[in-house]
Amino acid sequence: MDSTLSCHGPADPVRRVEQALQPGIAATAKRARNEARATAKQIRADNEAKRAAAAERKRANKAGETQVEAKAAEPDEPEPEAKPELNFATAPTLRLHDIVVEPPTLSLKRKVPNSEPSFALSAPTDRVPASRAPIGLAQQEAMKAEREGAIRRYREMKAAKLAAA
């Protein structure tokens, strides 16, 4: 078989590019797997340390020590960082059936629509959608005749039901 006619042979440029990039792709994937494993291992170690500290506190509480003494006895555990105190204003409580005196004002600027397109074949902007367009007289007459026919058929069907019962 001729190698120039084969789509999977050495003459296929896409395959050659993939083969050239394969070592780099494999190395990147391996590095990512190793980093994920290291992160998972660190998380497990942190969780185990927390569990051990909690068990130690429980044992200390059972032995009669206070948590402050247990913490003072364990100096190698770093102090948790102090979080800044957040002071939020509380929203005024609204009673049921309160009346709003003034609507809120918006400070957003309205977008100005673009000016008319400059090309000559632009669509007119005063067009009405088909659902809102006025109905022509011929269509009105056809709808009226169809409505009357439907009413007549309904009355006939009702009379047939009453006669059968």
Image (tube, rainbow, N blue to C red):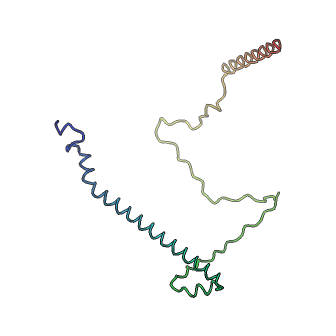
**121 to 58, vertically: above or below:** above
Q: How many marks?
A: 0
- Examine the image and state in which quarter residue 161 appears: top right
Residue 119 in the image: x percent, y percent?
46, 39
**96 to 5, vertically: above or below:** below
In this picture, residue 4 sits left or right of residue 160: left
**5 to 67, vertically: above or below:** above
**1 to 139, vertically: above or below:** below
Q: Looking at the rendering, in which quadrant would you find the N terminus? A: top left
Residue 141 in the image: x percent, y percent?
70, 18
Residue 77 in the image: x percent, y percent?
52, 82
Viewer-side residue, 83 vs 94: 83
At x 55% / y 82%, what residue is drawn?
Answer: 79
Q: Looking at the rendering, in which quadrant would you find the C terminus? A: top right
- Examine the image and state in which quarter residue 67 appears: bottom right
At x 55% / y 36%, what residue is drawn?
Answer: 124
At x 77% / y 65%, what residue is drawn?
Answer: 93
In this picture, residue 132 sits left or right of residue 4: right
At x 55% / y 73%, what residue is drawn?
Answer: 51
Viewer-side residue, 21 vs 92: 21
In this picture, residue 124 sits left or right of residue 39: right
- Examine the image and state in which quarter residue 29 appears: bottom left
Instruction: Spot the residue most to the left.
Output: 2
In this picture, residue 110 sits left or right of residue 14: right
